[in-house]
Image (cartoon, rainbow, N blue to C red):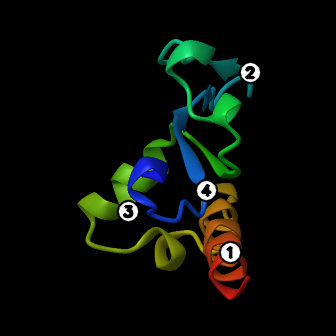
Amino acid sequence: FRESNVPVLGGIENMGPLSCPHCHEDVEVFPAVRDSRAIWPTGVEKLVELPFDPTLAQSAEHNRPLLVADPQGAQATRFRRLGEAVAAALAS
C-alpha cells in the first residue's frame, strides 16, 4: 500500500488467543506470526487485538450482530474500540 501511496490507518490482529471458558487461560489456537511476516515491525499501528471468540460466530449464526447480542461483552468492547481508532485515524 505504501508503494502505491495508499494511506494505511492501521492493522487489526485477528483470531488471537482463545480465552478458555473454564479456566480463563489463553489458548493459542493459531501460532504467532513471525516478525518477518508481520506488519507491526514496519511501523503499522495496531488498532485492536481481536481474540478468537465463539460468541462472534454464535451471534452471526443467530443473525444478531455481536453489538446487539452481547453489547457489554469483551468482544463488543474491542469492536467499539476499533471503530473509535478508525474514526480518530480518519480525523487526523
| Viewer-side label of 2, 1 | 1
In the rendering, which numbered label is found on residue 10?
Answer: 4
| Viewer-side label of 3, 4 | 4
Q: How many marks?
A: 4
| Viewer-side label of 2, 4 | 4
Q: Is residue 34 visible?
A: no
In space, the residues marked 3 and 4 are separated at their CA atoms by 26 Å
Which numbered disc, 3 or 4, marks the residue that appears first in the sequence?
A: 4
Image position, residue 19 (x, y; %):
65, 31
In space, the residues marked 3 and 2 are separated at their CA atoms by 23 Å
Q: Is residue 66 visible?
A: yes
Q: Amino acid at mark 3?
A: Ser
At mark 4, the secondary structure is loop
Disc 1: which residue: 89
In the rendering, which numbered label is found on residue 59?
Answer: 3
Taking 30 as reference, is 86 above or below it? below
Q: Amino acid at mark 1?
A: Ala
Q: Amino acid at mark 2?
A: Glu
At mark 3, the secondary structure is helix
The residue drawn where x is 70% and y is 68% is: 81
Label 4 packing within 10 angstroms: few (<14), some (14-19), many (20+): some
Instruction: Kindly check if marks 4 and 1 are in contact, taking CB atoms under 8 A apart as contact.
Output: yes
Q: Amino acid at mark 4?
A: Gly
In space, the residues marked 1 and 3 are separated at their CA atoms by 28 Å
